[in-house]
Image (spheres, helix red, strand yellow):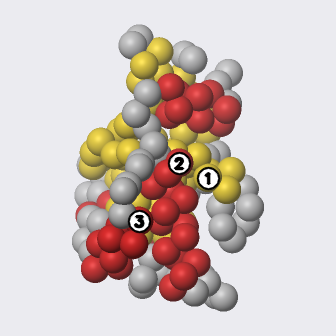
């Protein structure tokens, strides 16, 4: 049975690219390709799979409504997926005691965990703030695959 360690290994083995799926209000599935990576949840400390999302992304509305999130990673004919509830941390979704600078650091941490590099992190921070970016933290309760 695959574990969160397998998900992390798959994400680290190439580009951090994964398919992320949520459920729309009508029961259909929305999937998109994103960069994601493993991080420690900044509130609970538990290991989770995280991505940075546009503040206007439809997936955020699905998550706010209660949709679980599935992150699926494929390497050749091998694959692993992690599914569970997700927490949002962004300009409109700050946990108690979480400051703007905490959000800035979290977005950087997720970016780096997903394999991102940037020559101008101050510029990155400005772009994330201007675009209202949100950290999506998936807390896996089910992990499947043939890894």
Q: Quarter of the image containing the N terminus?
A: top right
Q: Are marks 2 and 1 in contact (CB under 8 Å)?
A: yes
- Residue at horizontal 54%, vertical 22%? 145
Q: Along the horizontal axis of the image, is 121 left or right of 47?
A: left
Label 1, secondary structure: give it.
Answer: strand
Q: Residues within 10 Å of mark 3 (few under 14, many from 20)?
A: few
> Residue 85 at x, y = what percent?
55, 57
Which picture quadrant has residue 121?
bottom left
Q: Residues within 10 Å of mark 2 (few under 14, many from 20)?
A: many
Which picture quadrant has residue 102?
bottom right
Whether residue 67 appears in this view of the structure is no
> Residue 134 at x, y = what percent?
41, 69
Which residue bears the numbered disc 2? 113
Which residue bears the numbered disc 1? 39
Q: Are marks 1 and 3 in contact (CB under 8 Å)?
A: no
Q: CA distance from mark 3 to mark 2?
A: 15 Å
The disc label shown at residue 121, or none: 3
Sequence-earlier tag: 3 or 2: 2
Looking at the image, residue 5 lies above or below residue 103: above
Looking at the image, residue 147 lies above or below residue 103: above
Label 3, secondary structure: give it.
Answer: helix
101, 46: nearer the viewer: 101
| Residue extending farthest top | 77
Q: Quarter of the image containing the C terminus?
A: top right
Q: Are marks 3 and 2 in contact (CB under 8 Å)?
A: no
133, 122: nearer the viewer: 122
Q: Along the horizontal axis of the image, is 76 left or right of 81?
A: left
Q: Nearer the viewer, mark 3 or mark 2?
A: 3
> Residue 96 at x, y = what percent?
64, 87
- Residue at horizontal 45%, vertical 43%? 115
- Residue at horizontal 53%, vertical 48%? 113
Sequence-earlier tag: 2 or 1: 1
């Amino acid at each position: 049975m695959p574990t969160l360690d397998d998900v992390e290994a798959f994400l680290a083995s190439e580009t951090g690219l994964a398919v992320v799926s949520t459920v729309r209000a009508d029961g259909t599935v929305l999937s998109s390709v994103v960069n994601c990576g493993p991080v420690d949840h900044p509130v609970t400390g538990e290991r989770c799979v995280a991505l940075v999302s546009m503040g206007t992304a439809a997936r955020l509305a699905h998550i706010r409504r209660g949709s679980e999130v599935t992150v699926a990673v494929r390497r050749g004919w091998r694959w692993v997926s992690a599914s569970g509830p997700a927490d949002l941390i962004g300009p409109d979704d700050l946990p108690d005691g979480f400051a703007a600078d905490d959000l800035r650091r979290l977005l950087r941490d997720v970016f780096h965990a997903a394999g991102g590099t940037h020559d101008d992190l101050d510029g990155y921070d400005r772009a994330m703030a201007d675009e209202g970016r949100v950290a999506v933290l998936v807390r896996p309760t089910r992990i499947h695959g043939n890894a």
